[in-house]
């Protein structure tokens, strides 16, 4: 007998919301808003509004979109077609998982948090010592991740109840003291884009976090845990996910805004990079222990992100390849992450980043159309496909035009020619040339869906999108375990 479905809100949703915040908040999310403050100077407020729209609203919308189907991203991607949806989803999980994001948070936490405390190889230039230190650290780092994942059903509790409060308290204390202790100063690092159009510059910075992709990944974890805690009715799942994403989004917005204003407090200092600037700010705020506290913040941010990414990616690939045991899948994730983190593999990383750039446009289209579809009485079919297909095509061209291996000094002539063509499109100069053609695809798709609606039930099985919402069902169609 099925247990009654929950409909209201409880403390578990609050814990899940804080856990989701910590999973989103990696080292890059620490740096981007701080850099906005350093570069924006007096124009920081419109710049912050811009980064909040794309850096916070997109991930929240992505979580809501994922919750329109019981299985999250793996099924809503199917609405653009079986094969394209599968390719998109696998690419997203590889990019946000073991091939890029997971090894990146390990190396970034080493460079920003641990290495400055040890000064290993920093003064002598001993690269061998640095490589050994990174290898030992990454082994320990992923071992801790595995410990946190040894019980998947407890992952959100461990992050939301223990790690997130520690991370949030340190961040908020640092921000609060900075606001009272350090005066606002004029920047000596003005960025022309922030001076000319600060709102647009912040908008593009938030877009560059690519957290909308992560929202599709984390949606797998959140929705699965909501089902496990009794949220089975479609509306209750959507509302619970929206509440959880709202908690995470509000937390991100508060921290992003605070970090941006911390940036305005150290904008008169000579800093080599944003990470060094944040470390300097921590030392100005906390004194001699500033670097240690900053290291703890970076470590916690990277650890929670890596745990969420590995948990979601493992779950997705176990569902995709059911014959592979979870322990074996975890081992595969750890081994590949260790290889990419320690061997450099710059050429592979260049290819993976290119894949990420190509998958971002269709992912954003999928998120927006899924939310639009959720509010409409008629099911959308061609709206998904035309917008995502067009966005994918332009996204692939944009990714190819900027692809560059580390050995190359600059892009080739034909790549530059392709860039010149793409720059003709609106927003093409900021790698968003796909937006206008995709909007045209949305308009044409909606017209077709309204004038000639497709009865999904009459489609051949090979053409039936399994992720199309079932408006006649009150509950998510989950498999019943015996």
Image: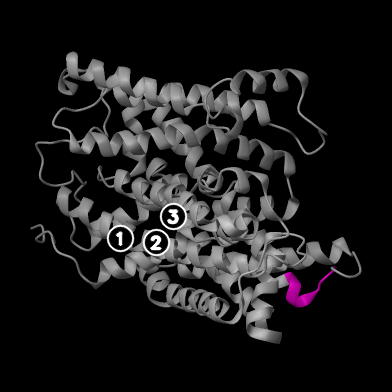
Q: Residue at x 31, y 43 (%)?
A: 65
x, y percent for residue 326? 44, 54
Q: Earlier in the sequence, mark 2 or mark 1?
A: 2
**Mark 2 and mark 1 residues within 8 Å of each other at the beta carbon:** yes
In front of the other: label 2 or label 3? 2
Q: Position of residue 249 (x, y in %)?
A: 38, 59
* Residues packed near mark 3 inside 10 Å, few (<14), some (14 to 19) or many (20 plus): some
- Estimate the spatial distance between the alpha carbons at disc 1 and disc 3, rounded to whole Å: 27 Å
Q: Secondary structure at mark 2?
A: helix
Label 2 crowding class (10 Å Cα cut-off): few <14, some 14-19, many 20+?
many
Q: Which residue is at the far right?
A: 124
Q: Relative to the observer, which residue lies in front, 316 or 432? A: 432
- Tell which circle, 1 or 3, labels the residue nearer the N-terminal end: 1
In three-dimensional space, the C-alpha distance between marks 2 and 1, rounded to whole angstroms, equals 8 Å
**Residue 220 shows which numbered tag?**
none
Quarter of the view holding residue 180: bottom right
x, y percent for residue 253: 43, 61
Determine the residue positioned at 31% across, 21% down: 443
**Is residue 326 among what the camera can see?**
yes
Quick check: 203 above or below 365?
A: below
From the viewer's perspective, is 371 left or right of 97?
left
Residue at (23% x, 34% y) in the render: 373
Secondary element at tag 1: helix
Residue occupied by mark 2: 20
Helix, strand or loop status at disc 3 = helix
The residue positioned 57% from the left and 32% from the top of the image is 431
Give the x, y percent position of residue 147: 49, 70
To which residue does mark 3 refer?
326
- Magenta span: 115-121
Instruction: Provide the residue designation for mark 1.
Output: 244
Place residue 447 in its image quadrant. top left
How busy is the neighbourhood of tag 1: few (under 14 within 10 Å), some, or many (20 plus)?
many
């Amino acid at each position: 007998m099925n247990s009654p479905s929950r409909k209201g809100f409880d403390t578990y949703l609050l814990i899940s919301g804080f856990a989701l915040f910590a999973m989103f908040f990696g080292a890059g999310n620490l740096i981007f808003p701080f850099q906005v403050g350093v570069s924006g100077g007096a124009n920081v407020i419109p710049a912050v509004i811009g980064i909040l729209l794309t850096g916070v609203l997109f991930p929240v919308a992505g979580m809501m979109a994922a919750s329109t189907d019981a299985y999250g991203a793996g099924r809503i991607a199917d609405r653009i077609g079986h094969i394209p949806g599968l390719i998109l989803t696998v690419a997203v999980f590889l990019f946000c998982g073991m091939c890029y994001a997971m090894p990146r948070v390990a190396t970034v936490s080493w460079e920003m948090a641990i290495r400055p405390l040890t000064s290993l190889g920093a003064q002598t230039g001993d690269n061998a010592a640095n490589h050994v230190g990174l290898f030992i650290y990454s082994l320990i780092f992923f071992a801790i991740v595995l410990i946190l994942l040894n019980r998947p059903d407890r992952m959100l509790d461990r992050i939301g109840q223990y790690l997130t409060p520690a991370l949030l308290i340190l961040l908020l204390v640092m921000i609060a003291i900075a606001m009272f202790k350090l005066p606002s100063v004029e920047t000596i690092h003005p960025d022309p884009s922030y001076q000319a159009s600060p709102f647009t510059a912040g908008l593009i910075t938030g877009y560059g976090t690519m957290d909308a992709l992560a929202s599709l990944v984390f949606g797998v974890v959140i929705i699965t845990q909501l089902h496990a805690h009794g949220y089975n009715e479609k509306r209750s799942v959507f509302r619970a996910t929206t509440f959880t994403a709202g908690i995470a989004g509000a937390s991100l917005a508060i921290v992003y805004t605070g970090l941006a204003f911390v940036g305005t407090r150290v904008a008169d200092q000579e800093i080599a990079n944003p990470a060094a600037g944040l470390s300097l700010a921590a030392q100005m705020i906390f004194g001699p222990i500033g670097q240690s506290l900053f290291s703890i913040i970076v470590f916690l941010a990277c650890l929670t992100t890596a745990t969420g990414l590995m948990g979601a990616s493992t779950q997705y690939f176990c569902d995709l390849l059911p014959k592979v045991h979870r322990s074996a899948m975890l081992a595969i994730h750890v081994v590949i992450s260790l290889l990419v983190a320690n061997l450099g593999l710059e050429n592979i990383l260049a290819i993976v980043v290119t894949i990420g750039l190509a998958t971002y446009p269709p992912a954003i289209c999928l998120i927006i159309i899924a939310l639009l579809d959720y509010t409409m009485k008629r099911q959308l079919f061609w709206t998904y496909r035309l917008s995502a297909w067009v966005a994918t095509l332009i996204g692939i061209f944009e990714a190819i035009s900027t692809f560059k291996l580390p050995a190359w000094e600059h892009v080739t002539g034909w790549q530059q020619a392709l860039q010149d063509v793409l720059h003709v499109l609106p927003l093409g100069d900021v790698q968003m040339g796909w937006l206008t053609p995709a909007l045209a695809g949305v308009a044409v798709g909606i017209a077709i869906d309204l004038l000639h609606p497709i009865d999904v039930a009459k489609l051949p099985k090979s053409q039936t999108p399994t992720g199309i919402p079932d408006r006649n069902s009150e509950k998510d169609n989950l498999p019943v375990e015996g």
